[in-house]
Image (cartoon, rainbow, N blue to C red):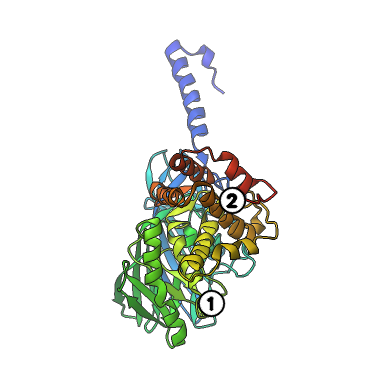
C-alpha cells in the first residue's frame, strides 16, 4: 500500500477523496432486493426498479406446447443498481440485453438475477430484453390448491396461462407482484387456423410467410402480472355491442349453444354495476372459455371460464373484479379480501336485487360457521371461505352501520380515488371514515382482524 502520510498535502487530500468516493460508489451500487417484502410471498416481485411496460413477442408451437419468446421490459431504477432480479420459473434463457448491451445473468430457482454491463443510476430508465424458450412448467402455488398456474395445455387442443397469484412467471420474466403494475403489448404467433386471445384490445393480425399468424393485443391501462392471460386455440369470437361496453367473447368452436347464450346477461350486469360503482375501468370486456378450466378467473378485460353453463352470479363476481381487484389492486397478497370480499358481496346483492332471493341471508347462513378474520390470513387461506364470506359480511355490516346511501358513496369514492392503482386495507378504511364522517377503526378491527366474528354491525 502506498504511504499517503508521506505525500505532499494536496495529493493526500486527493488520495483520501478517491478512497472515500470508492467506498461511496461501492455502497451505492447494491443489488436490488429479491422480493418486495410480501408477508405471504417473500420471493415474489423484486426491489430497486419499477416497470412501465412489458412487450412480449411469443411464438407458440402447439404440437410440443413449446414457446420461443422475447420479452422487452421498460423500467425505471428506484435506486442505484449493480444488479437486479426478475421472476422467471423454468424455461431456458438464451440472451439478456440491458439498454442494448449484453448482460450477464444467473438463475436461482425462480429468481433471475441480471447484472448489466454498466450499473444503473437511481432514476434512470432502462430496457431489458430477454430471449428465452422451452415448454412451460405449470406451478403448484400454496395459495391455490384446485389448479396449477401459468401456461399449460387445457384438454389438448387449447393452451394458455392463468396465473393468480404466482403463475405469470412460467411464461414471461417480470416483476411478479401486483404492487408494480404496468401496461402490456402481447404479440402472439400461432399456426394458421388458431387464434390467440389476450388482455386489452386486439390491434393487429398479420399473416406470416411460414403458415403462421401474429396477433397483437394492447393493454394500455396498468395491469398486475397475475391478471395476464393468453389463450390459444380454435376460438370463435362473439361480439355484443348492445350495451355500454363493447363485449367480445372467445368460445371454442362448436361450444354448446346453452353455454354461449349463458353469457348473454353480461351487458345487463354491466349496466347494473356501472350504476352502482362507476364507469367500467377499461375499454372492452369479455370472457374466454377454456375447456377443462375448473374455476373462473377475472383476468383483466377477458375473464376465464370453464366449458359449463355459467351461473349469472359468477358472471357478476368476475365482472366486479374488473373494478375491485383489477383497477384497484391489492398492494399486498394479505389484503386479498379487498378483491374477493367485494366480488362476493356483489353476488349476494345481485341475488337480492335482481333475482329476488334472500341473497344477504344466504351469505349469512354460509358464514354461520365461525370464520377466521380475513385481514390476517396465511397463504393457504388466500382463496378460502374467510376471505370470500367474512370479507363480504364485513361490507354488509358496513352497509348496515352507515346506511345504504353512505355505503354506496364509500364504494364509489374508494373506486374513484384508487382507480388504476394499488391499495391496502388502510386505504379503504380512510375512505370509509372520510365519506361517513365516523371513526370506523374499531368496526374494521373487529371484522377484519379479531378472531371472534361480530354478531352484528
Ligand atoms: N380470483 C378467483 C375468483 O374469482 C379465484 C382464483 C384465484 C382462481 N386463483 C385462481 C381461479 C386460479 C382459477 C385459477 O374467485
Ligand atoms: Zn373472485
How many marks are shown on the rendered structure? 2
In the image shown, does 332 or 265 lie closer to the viewer?
265
**Label 1 crowd bin: few (<14), some (14–19), many (20+), radius 10 Å:** many
Q: Up-down: is 81 above or below 329?
A: above
Q: Residue at x 34, y 69 (%)?
A: 216
Tell me which label, 1 or 2, sits earlier in the chain. Answer: 1
Q: Which mark is residue 334?
A: 2
Image: 237 above or below 123 = below
Query: Which x, y percent locates residue 416?
Result: 38, 49
Q: Residue at x 54, y 47 (%)?
A: 401
Specify whether residue 45 is in view.
no
Name the mark on residue 153.
Answer: 1
User: Can the viewer see residue 423 in this picture?
Assistant: yes
Residue 95 x/y as whole percent: 46, 60
> Residue 76: where, in percent of width, then height?
40, 45
Residue drawn where x is 68% and y is 56% of the image = 371
**Vertical placement of residue 158 versus 268, above or below:** below
Amino acid at each position: 500500500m502506498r504511504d499517503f502520510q508521506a505525500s505532499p498535502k494536496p495529493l493526500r487530500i486527493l488520495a483520501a477523496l478517491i478512497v472515500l468516493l470508492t467506498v461511496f460508489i461501492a455502497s451505492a451500487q447494491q443489488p436490488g432486493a429479491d422480493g418486495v417484502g410480501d408477508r405471504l410471498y417473500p420471493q415474489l416481485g423484486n426491489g430497486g426498479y419499477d416497470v412501465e411496460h412489458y412487450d412480449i413477442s411469443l411464438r407458440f408451437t402447439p404440437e410440443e406446447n413449446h414457446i420461443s419468446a422475447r420479452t422487452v421490459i421498460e423500467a425505471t431504477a428506484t435506486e442505484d443498481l449493480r444488479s437486479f432480479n426478475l421472476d422467471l420459473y423454468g424455461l431456458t434463457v438464451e440472451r439478456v440485453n440491458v439498454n442494448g448491451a449484453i448482460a450477464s445473468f444467473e438463475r436461482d430457482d425462480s429468481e433471475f438475477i441480471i447484472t448489466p454491463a454498466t450499473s444503473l443510476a437511481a432514476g434512470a430508465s432502462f430496457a431489458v430484453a430477454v430471449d428465452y424458450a422451452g415448454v412451460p412448467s405449470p406451478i403448484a402455488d400454496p395459495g391455490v390448491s384446485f389448479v396449477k398456474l401459468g401456461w399449460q395445455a387445457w384438454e389438448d387442443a387449447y393452451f394458455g396461462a392463468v396465473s393468480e397469484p404466482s403463475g405469470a412467471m412460467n411464461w414471461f420474466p417480470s416483476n411478479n407482484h401486483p404492487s408494480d403494475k404496468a401496461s402490456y403489448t402481447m404479440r402472439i404467433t400461432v399456426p394458421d387456423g388458431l387464434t390467440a386471445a389476450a388482455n386489452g384490445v386486439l390491434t393487429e393480425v398479420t399473416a406470416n410467410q411460414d403458415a403462421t399468424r401474429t396477433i397483437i393485443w394492447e393493454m394500455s391501462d396498468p395491469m398486475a402480472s397475475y391478471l395476464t392471460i393468453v389463450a390459444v386455440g380454435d376460438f370463435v369470437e362473439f361480439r355484443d355491442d348492445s350495451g355500454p361496453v363493447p363485449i367480445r367473447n372467445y368460445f371454442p368452436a362448436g361450444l354448446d349453444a346453452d353455454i354461449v347464450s349463458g353469457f348473454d346477461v353480461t351487458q345487463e350486469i354491466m349496466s347494473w354495476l356501472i350504476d352502482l360503482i362507476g364507469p367500467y375501468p377499461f375499454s372492452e370486456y369479455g370472457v374466454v372459455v377454456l375447456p377443462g378450466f375448473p374455476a373462473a378467473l377475472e383476468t383483466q378485460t377477458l375473464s376465464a371460464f370453464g366449458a359449463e353453463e355459467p351461473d349469472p352470479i359468477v358472471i357478476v363476481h368476475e365482472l366486479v373484479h374488473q373494478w375491485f381487484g383489477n383497477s384497484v389492486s391489492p398492494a399486498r397478497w394479505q389484503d386479498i379480501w379487498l378483491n374477493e370480499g367485494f366480488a362476493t358481496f356483489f353476488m349476494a346483492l345481485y341475488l337480492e336485487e335482481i333475482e329476488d332471493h334472500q341473497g344477504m341471508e344466504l351469505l349469512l347462513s354460509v358464514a354461520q360457521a365461525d370464520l377466521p378474520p380475513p385481514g390476517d390470513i396465511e397463504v393457504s387461506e388466500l382463496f378460502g371461505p374467510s376471505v370470500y364470506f367474512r370479507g363480504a359480511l364485513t361490507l354488509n355490516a358496513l352497509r348496515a352501520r352507515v346506511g345504504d346511501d353512505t355505503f354506496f358513496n364509500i364504494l364509489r369514492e374508494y373506486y374513484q380515488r384508487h382507480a388504476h392503482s394499488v391499495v391496502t386495507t388502510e386505504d379503504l378504511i380512510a375512505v370509509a371514515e372520510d365519506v361517513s364522517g365516523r371513526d370506523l377503526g374499531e368496526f374494521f378491527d373487529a371484522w377484519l382482524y379479531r378472531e371472534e366474528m361480530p354478531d352484528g354491525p
